[in-house]
Amino acid sequence: MATPPIVIATGTTVGPFEGQSPLAKDFDLIAGDLTLGQASFELAERELMNSACLKAMQKAKRTEKDIDLFIAGDLLNQIITSGFNASLLGLPFFGVYGACSTSMAGLGLGAMLIDGGFIGTALTATSSHYSAAERQYRYPTEYGNQRRPYGQWTVTGAGAALLTTQGKGPRVTHVTVGKMTDFGVKDPLNMGAAMAPAAADTMLRHFADTKRMPEDYDLIVTGDLGEFGAEILRRWIKETGGLELGIRYKDCGAMIYDRVKYPQVASGGSGCGCSAVVVFGHLFREMERGRYRRILVIATGAMHSPTSVMQKQTIPCIAHAVAFEFP
Amino acid sequence: MATPPIVIATGTTVGPFEGQSPLAKDFDLIAGDLTLGQASFELAERELMNSACLKAMQKAKRTEKDIDLFIAGDLLNQIITSGFNASLLGLPFFGVYGACSTSMAGLGLGAMLIDGGFIGTALTATSSHYSAAERQYRYPTEYGNQRRPYGQWTVTGAGAALLTTQGKGPRVTHVTVGKMTDFGVKDPLNMGAAMAPAAADTMLRHFADTKRMPEDYDLIVTGDLGEFGAEILRRWIKETGGLELGIRYKDCGAMIYDRVKYPQVASGGSGCGCSAVVVFGHLFREMERGRYRRILVIATGAMHSPTSVMQKQTIPCIAHAVAFEFP
């Protein structure tokens, strides 16, 4: 960016299970139950995103009048969570879809439109809801299906970020747009393996484009590869890129749950809300607390649908990277 | 735009029924049947978009190496048509979703990212397929349902546009991003009525922002309101905006089919492909032929899903406007 836009405030809302997260103290709002008082899980997800958006606006002391554009996307068909929230906010709206990479797709686009001089302030948001996602993508939760060790648990959570040109907060210095990467994985229950090559491709292109190295970051974090996917990525970067990520590399999906206490989450968290709440909630506060000065977030997404899986298609994946710097 | 990006080439592919369109001579490719030789309608739609993209690249004598970014979206869940095409092209990719407004959402975003200096060349695309859309949104086509007079027929078609900084073609001078507009319509079979207020809102904001009037355009065209929706819009603009659109106003949905010969299309065409093939195929050629110098395209989209309709939610709509000028 010529003049890096600044994330002046964020809002994060999570479900009750995510309220047990080791990172929970960094989330703004924790819902008491999965319905948030709504008649359906889809309406509950709408409420999740709405509360995250309002929280970000409230913290920055901004109203809808101060915001030029809302950019959002989510996992539900036709991104209805985002659409209805755009309707509630009454702001000009671009809908985006990058599966679980949506958090950084939206934020990256917002940053470019600000730096390009088209808008002054953008609100970007994304969300996912365990129960709404399970019944759309997988099985009715009533079946009580167990996850395989490499399976992941959809995060109930929403994150919103308010970006503008003046203020205090993490600055968006670089955006590396993802390419679809397809290594032929067809198992929708093994997302980490499908998405790891996309994260690796974006990471290596980011280093090549920016002439940076892993050592230039205090933290490199992927969206939601989970523990297994993160291990694939780590080895891949070493074998194909010759780079050791070491302890500066983490994964939002592996971070969000206490996987010893709650083994049902298997390899970790997933869903659009996963990287959104971990980055906007936890990591940005860690930056404020002085723990990290410069971080690279690589949000990963699996771009399949239940229809494409039933038609025996592969699962092409994408990863969008955004570099943040706290001055 | 500070330096209006130029649409140097477009590609349009349509299905056999659209091959009977009064505008058919302006479409690049007409498929012989609805399957395009593929095993499913979803795979056929993928092929539609792919052929439109390749056609645009071929006409401009560009390959993937000359293109910095692919921006696309479509009606299928999780925009799989666009995702798989991004995978085929191997380009950096942003997925967008604006229902039938996607053609102008993608093109508008691409133009801003070029004018902002982030990329040099963008390929934008969108598509819809009658049979894939019907079975996802409405009823199995085997039922042989008849449309109500205000119903619309999903266009089988894909349009792609190649945008860059140098060359000959329509220039993108203005983008007006849509706001969600919700007047409480709940009938998913009456899209024109749901979308007309969104088109009106964007049109009036466009005139206010740019200090232009309808007379400044040789043609103002909405995405796919159909005959009934277009009539609602025309009256709305007169009653709330005090403006007479007159004969300079048309609607892509009302233009694409011969509604006398094929009454089954009812109020006209719809779907992401509708405005894409009419604008990229027909209208841009009319500009080249000297019929229009300056046009305003307002692509409209209904941001519902079958789930939101079944949960008795309203249908919020959006419309994105892009102004084109042929030098």
Image (cartoon, coloured by chain):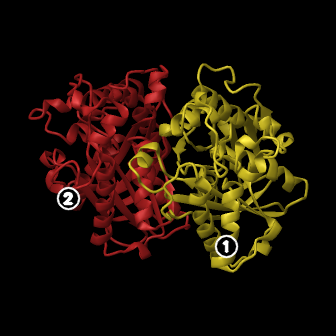
Chain colours: A red, B yellow
For the N terminus of chain B, the image quarter is bottom right
Identified by mark 2, the residue type is Leu
Coordinates of residue A1 in the picture (x, y in percent): 48, 59
Q: Which disc, if any, is residue B292?
A: none
Q: Residue at position x 62%, y 76% from top?
A: B209
State the CA–CA distance, disc 1 to disc 2: 43 Å
| Residue A261, image x, y percentages | 8, 35
Q: Is residue B42 left or right of residue A198?
A: right
The image quarter in which residue A290 lies: bottom left
- Please, what secondary structure does the residue beneath circle 1 have? helix
User: Taking A145 as reference, is B286 left or right?
Assistant: right
Tag 1: residue type? Ile
Determine the secondary structure under disc 2: strand
The numbered mark 1 sits on a residue in which chain?
Answer: B
Give the labeled residue for mark 1.
B237
Residue at 20% in and 54% down? A291
Q: Is residue B257 left or right of residue B290?
A: left
Q: Badge 2 sits on which subunit? A: A
The extreme left residue here reads: A261
Residue at point 82%, 37% (across, down): B20
Q: Which residue is mark 2?
A: A29
Along the line of sight, the residue nearer the viewer: A275 or B130: B130
